């Protein structure tokens, strides 16, 4: 199946909206101004990169010649370049980017006949999620380097927050002891390093503070 519309028309007609403006998404979190600015800056760079890959996939699909491997490499390259531009690329994130690049492209392949998977809304939704993951990891590593000993989980207590994240809200632990979140171990909010379930990661708006 191909789409008999242009990429711009696809986005204009899209009725599925998961992303919200970055200032609102990150503004709801308990962040300093600097932390919010960092997350917004990375999200904007990632959105541009992800949208390029989705447009590339859309165009290749129009010609019935999709090179999934190329798309994965472009996704990974754009993500890594964004991390380097803000000085937050480390060995863990480099490995993570390889994995998430494969997962993002595989997800598109599985849903290649669903228009939403090529949209700017999806690019933005992925970007805000990934930016939060990156800087939650960066904050954790910085806290350890600067001698912080404890950490506390902060959830946004609204109707969209998972019950499993409400349950750990306010919990204080030694900095190296993982939180137990809905059956997953997580060193901090939005942590994928210990194999947390995707159901605990996607659109996680929680933050962790250190002291």
Image (cartoon, rainbow, N blue to C red):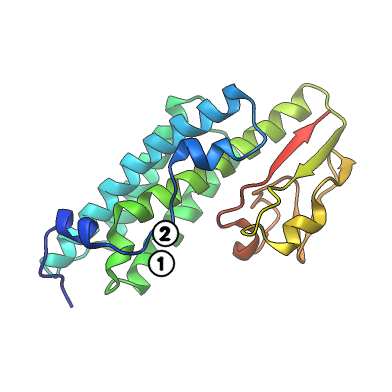
Q: Is residue 160 above or below residue 89?
A: below
From the viewer's side, name the closer residue of 92 and 56: 56
User: At 51% across and 26% down in the image, what residue appears?
Assistant: 37
Residue receiving disc 2: 104
**Mark 1, secondary structure of its residue:** helix
**Left or right of 19, for residue 141:** right
Q: Measured from the top left, where is residue 99 in percent x and y?
A: 50, 55
Query: Few, some or many C-alpha atoms within 10 Å of disc 2 (few <14, some 14-19, many ≥20)?
Result: some
The image quadrant that residue 167 belongs to is bottom right
Q: Measured from the top left, where is residue 165 in percent x and y?
A: 73, 56
Q: How many marks?
A: 2
**Mark 2, secondary structure of its residue:** helix
**Left or right of 152, for residue 162:** left
Quadrant of the drawing holding the N terminus? bottom left
Q: Measured from the top left, where is residue 104 in percent x and y?
A: 42, 59
Q: Is residue 210 above or below residue 24?
A: above
User: At 36% across and 50% down in the image, what residue appears?
Assistant: 123
Residue 36's label in the rendered image is: none
User: At 31% across and 40% down in the image, what residue appears?
Assistant: 48
Quadrant of the drawing holding the C terminus? top right
Between the residue at mark 2 and the residue at mark 1, the CA separation in whole angstroms equals 5 Å
- Residue found at the very far front of the displayed protein: 159
The image quadrant that residue 173 belongs to is top right
- Please report contact status of discs 2 and 1: CB closer than 8 Å, yes or no: yes
Residue receiving disc 1: 107
């Amino acid at each position: 199946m191909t789409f008999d519309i242009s990429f711009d028309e696809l986005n204009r007609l899209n009725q599925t909206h998961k992303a919200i403006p970055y200032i609102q998404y990150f503004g709801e979190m308990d962040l300093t101004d600097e932390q919010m600015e960092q997350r917004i800056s990375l999200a904007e760079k990632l959105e541009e990169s992800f949208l390029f890959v989705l447009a590339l996939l859309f165009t290749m699909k129009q010609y019935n010649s999709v090179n999934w491997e190329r798309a994965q490499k472009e996704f990974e390259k754009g993500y890594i370049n964004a991390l380097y531009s803000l000085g937050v690329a480390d060995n863990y994130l480099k490995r993570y980017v390889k994995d998430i690049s494969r997962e993002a492209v595989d997800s598109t392949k599985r849903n290649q006949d669903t228009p939403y998977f090529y949209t700017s809304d999806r690019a933005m939704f992925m970007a805000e999620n990934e930016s939060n993951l990156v800087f939650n990891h960066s904050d954790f590593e910085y806290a350890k380097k600067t001698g912080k000993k404890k950490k506390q989980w902060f959830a946004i207590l609204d109707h969209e927050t998972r019950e499993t994240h409400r349950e750990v809200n306010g919990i204080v632990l030694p900095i190296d002891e993982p939180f137990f979140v809905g059956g997953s171990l997580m060193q901090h909010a939005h942590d994928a390093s210990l194999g947390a379930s995707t159901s605990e990661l996607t659109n996680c708006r929680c933050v962790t503070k250190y002291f």
